[in-house]
Amino acid sequence: MSLTGASDRSVPATKIEITVSCRNLLDLDTFSKSDPMVVLFTQTRASQEWREFGRTEVIDNTLNPDFLRKFVLDYFFEEKQNLRFDVYNVDSKTNISKPKDFLGQAFLALGEVIGGQGSRVERPLTGIPGKKCGTILLTAEELSNCRDIATMQLCANKLDKKDFFGKSDPFLVFYRSNEDGTFTICHKTEVVKNTLNPVWQPFTIPVRALCNGDYDRTVKIDVYDWDRDGSHDFIGEFTTSYRELTKAQSQFTVYEVLNPRKKCKKKKYVNSGTVCLSFSQVTLLSFTVDSEFTFVDYIKGGTQLNFTVAIDFTASNGNPLQPTSLHYMSPYQLSAYAMALKAVGEIIQDYDSDKLFPAYGFGAKVPPEGRISHQFPLNNNSEDPNCAGIEGVLESYFQSLRTVQLYGPTYFAPVINQVARAAAKVSDGSQYYVLLIITDGVISDMTQTKEAIVSASSLPMSIIIVGVGPAMFEAMEELDGDDVRVSSRGRYAERDIVQVAPGGSMASAWFVPFRDYIDRSGNQVLSMARLAKDVLAEIPEQLLSYMRTHDIQPRPAPSASPSPPSLQP
């Protein structure tokens, strides 16, 4: 991955603590109540096998246990993390593998727990035919030792000149050290063009990303001269620590930028420049550390993710009745369109309480008049384009393939504007919109799409663009905001809004070619998991970016409805 395309995915995984209770369990003991224990199983992505993750303690003689032992899981928004909770009656002389000791089980995703009201869900226990097995109550809470964020600003003086016809185009790359002596990238500044004395914009970074809570851990900062072809020239480096950085609030701090190679070759070498550090928030020379709000804080406070899908119905996809078509409905496997939709949708739906998803098609002639439409509802209901769940979206998609005529051209702007109009109506942080566009070809309305994206960049909205098929998608690079913000008629996007590559910097829109995720063995489940992991990885940070920009704090978590009191002695 190139330095200018690096993302902040190196931030340690969010730790989620799951608290377990049960209510109205079956009573399998003759002279007393059951002695329950819960076993958690997680599912591996590759093999889909269930593996035991951990167990609660055994609580004697109760049908309504509240377990003290917690499960702590790494949480990844971009992955569907399937969980299975098995409940057993454990007597001192029995083994939980015996069927008679089984009290029931529940299947759900970690996202369902976090996305529940107050990050709390209650599910019925099943698995014993003809029996009411009671319920299991799960509560999720984020664990974090350090939730501070630092705001800082850096400038440099007299850097080495690297460009033949100009000066340098410098940028900084931050790394935190690992226990094995390696370094992990954790931040990259913007590029300042044609100067040896750059002043970079202030930026914020989670303290845990910078040092993972260890204030004396080494932080290495590399200085590069940006080149368009990605072969950035190394200017030099310096090291510091979070503790040392914080001293800048009371003293002026200057770091020498050293190039180890030059230092070895040239006896008179002094340095490749200096970097001056100041921390800013209220004034340019101040330092503050604030508590960082997280994605889970907003979800727990009631923020809903609204998922909309738009599918390309242009003729370049081929006749849906032919196996060569990208829309071919094979009885044996899903098409690339269906896989992309299912991969992304099945994760996002856990964070939408009503599970109703607007779904549109574009680039087809629709009945009965045969007019060309770039925004027709897949369910053929213009008054209510919502489909019930991802399965409902797939069903409407398949039905549309049977009724519309694939045509063209490929227009993105109408559906982007449609979702933007909905997002513009909600500015209090209670809703965040995610638009998935799946396409096979080159965009035909680039000017209008850039205008739509610039407008959408100030709204609570993210856009994911997935390209399917063998087409070359170089034209999409015009939407890439890594180096130069997307602009339209002199207006620049509020946030970087397009990433034309798997992975990359924070953005509110992504473009990825699905062919990069196809598993060589033909495993569709693994292909979908890979796609979802990459395209959804940035959604939490995009949501946080919008909330920070608009100074929106998470709402207090709603109080959970009282559950039946525990009958534990």
Image (cartoon, helix red, strand yellow):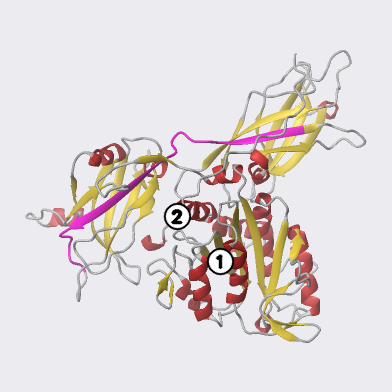
Q: Tell me if residue 151 is in the magenta stretch.
A: yes
Residue 469 visible in the current orientation: no
Residue 410 x, y percent position in the rendering = 61, 81
What is the span of residues highlighted in magenta in the rendered image? 136-162
Above or below 148: residue 314 = below
Q: Quadrant of the N terminus?
A: bottom left
The residue beneath circle 2 is: 549
Q: Residues within 10 Å of mark 2 (few under 14, many from 20)?
A: few
174 and 517: which is toward the camera: 174
- CA–CA distance in space, label 1 to label 2: 33 Å
Whole-percent x, y for residue 212 in the image: 41, 39
Q: Which residue is mark 1?
A: 516
Label 2 element class: helix
Q: Which mark is residue 75?
A: none
* SS majority, magenta: strand
- Across and down, in percent, residue 172 comes to 30, 56
